[in-house]
Amino acid sequence: MGSYWVHVCLFMILLMVIIGVTRGNNEDAEVTYDGRSLIIGGHRKILFSGSIHYPRSTPQMWPDLIAKAKEGGLDVIQTYVFWNIHEPQPGQYDFSGRYDLVRFIKEIEAQGLYVCLRIGPYIESEWTYGGFPFWLHDVPDIVYRTDNEPFKAYMQNFTTKIVSMMQSEGLYASQGGPIILSQIENEYQNIEHSFGEEGSRYVSWAADMAASLQTGVPWVMCKQTDAPDPLINACNGMRCGETFTGPNSPNKPALWTENWTSFYQVYGGKPYIRSAEDIAFHVTLFIARKNGSYVNYYMYHGGTNFGRSSSAYVITSYYDQAPLDEYGLLRQPKWGHLKEMHAAIKSCSTTLLQGMQSNFTLGELQEGYVFEEEEEEDGGCVAFLVNNDSVNKVTVQFQNRSYELPQKSISILPDCQNVTFNTATVNTNSNTRVINPVQTFSSTDKWDQFQDVIPNFDDTCLISDSLLEHMNLTKDNTDYLWYTLRFEQNSPCSEAILHLKSAAHVAHAFVDDTYIGGAHGNHNDKSFILEVSVELNEGTHNISILSVMVGLPDSGAFLERRFAGLTTMEIRCSEESHDLTNAAWGYQVGLLGEKLEIYEEQNSNSNEWCELGDNPTNQTLVWYKNVFDSPEGDEAVALNLESMGKGEAWVNGQSIGRYWVSFHDFNDQPSQTLYHVPRSFLKDSGNVLILFEEGGGNPLRISLNTVSVSLSSS
């Protein structure tokens, strides 16, 4: 009998050790909610959160980014889950390197922060195809994001995969992990009307499916005012203190899942600068007016759209104006001002969560909000004094005292007497980005080049008597699709006009292997026209059109039906016009250099390379190669590609993203010239740089730079 109990005791000890390893040092924390806030381990919480997307940075950057977020007063890191990178083919999964979601969440946990996991799996996020893997497009009878059985089956499968992975690692708060909140779908109400009753049924199905997964933490639907119970409807935008209609039940808290700290930038567009004062004003207003208890900054660190991950026309740098810039450096005064606001609100969070709210008028454009704990004799009192006048500062009277309020500002009084923070009073000094060139690439003899090949009709295998859709052929494996045909000119035409319309993003036209011109669209227009003159002698001519996508669309109803590529084509000569739209077209997917994987480090010494030509600016469809050493130190590194045109760049086989320097904004400035090279991509020496240039770029004038910040003197 004694031996039996000894074995029982040993078994229990072993079980406790296993549980301890699984759960780490955290205790199980039930997460529920009421009309005031999320409740974690029995305690109401005011939570400040920041979006940091793991594939838009590197595992080597994650600890520093999370530490700076924590130092900035954040409690939660929020991230999407990116379906297309994790399941590139049905049933084939990838969670390695920058895609290591579990490692990212465990790093957040190690630094003592919570996680909001936005599974989606539709995410938008200016990410190609809204995060959907393109193979979904080829599923028979599929219609995305509606009451469609094929789509629901794949969506449920991936959602269940992610939830099961989190559960197996003990990462939900109910298991002692850091995940306190999950999201299903994303801003669905924007398109729900397009699907009628099927859309409503889909919302109910998605909510039921998510709740059935038994994560032990609440689920949210953002921008979905009718989110079914028990899911919480949340707000997205810049002014949720003004625009949010509130929770759809008195038993749900007011959550703000996306407070846009800037806005995404597109090629041809300028960066959107949102001030620290404006962000602080609207956060404070949301808490005061809406009883807000969760605010997430989208983005807190935007990072980099490496490779071909950005959606249509979106630049490679993402939300560089966030509190942590693309390189993970503090953007002041934004970071510091928000940190100060977080501390001021946290200092009175107990009263905000337990007190009764009242509001009153202080003037024509002024108002006040007070939270008082009435049950205790010396209960807390918190006041927010709001000046909505964006022009004039005012003096208001509150509890027999005078308070001066700067224009468009809110003062926080944690004791209803003393101002500890005003949203328009910035005490943090600004800083400035410092770009330090450390290496140029001006030596012609250090460059090699590889000339890509222009295919003709006879080189192609796929033939059709119509213009085929671009994305359906490329499957998002490349930006490039060749359209080729043979054209018979019966008599000489010295001023023929090649006229085409395209629903892609760029078109380059070649006649008999000679470049004759190109054109491109923009983020706001669905199509563009290329019209260029060419001399055509009598006889047969090879016409080759390179159609280019700069990211796939990421939003809107019926995404699976979108059309890209050439839509019409004709050649005009004097009174004569030849409509070639339904001619015999040949197709080639991708470039020869892509097929040869010439950008891979192991292929950098292949025989395909030759010496740089005399005049690189006149070349089209050229790959360039150089070798460089890493800059000393640990400062961030960036390539200045201001002298290039349009293409993509790789360092040691890893794509640092697309560039499109030749697309200028209305001030005739490129939208992006600096391209982040993470330190983890680099070796001490012998780093291989590959550029693919569509046309017009000069690699001799690019430079390697370090990036840092310095405080301004004022």
Image (cartoon, rainbow, N blue to C red):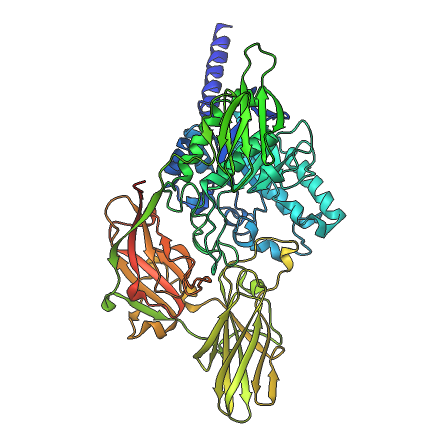
**Quadrant assignment, res 370:** top right
Give coordinates of residue 492: x percent, y percent.
Answer: 51, 93
Does residue 334 appear to the left or right of 703 in the view shown? right
- The answer to whether residue 209 of the structure is visible from this angle is yes
Give coordinates of residue 475: x percent, y percent.
Answer: 54, 60
Relative depth, front residue between 168 and 381: 381
Q: Name the residue: 54% across, 52% down.
A: 89
**Quadrant assignment, res 108:** top left
Q: Name the residue: 52% across, 55% down.
A: 311
Residue positioned most to the right: 197
Does residue 150 appear to the left or right of 344 in the view shown? right
Q: Name the residue: 49% across, 19% down.
A: 15
Give coordinates of residue 250: x percent, y percent.
Answer: 68, 28
Relative depth, front residue between 161 and 62: 62
Does residue 254 appear to the left or right of 664 in the view shown? right
**Quadrant assignment, res 372:** top right
Determine whether 151 is above or below 280 in the image. below
Q: Name the residue: 56% across, 51% down.
A: 130
Looking at the rendering, in which quadrant would you find the C terminus? top left
Relative depth, front residue between 303 and 144: 303
Give coordinates of residue 276: x percent, y percent.
Answer: 45, 40
Does residue 7 appear to the left or right of 237 in the view shown? left
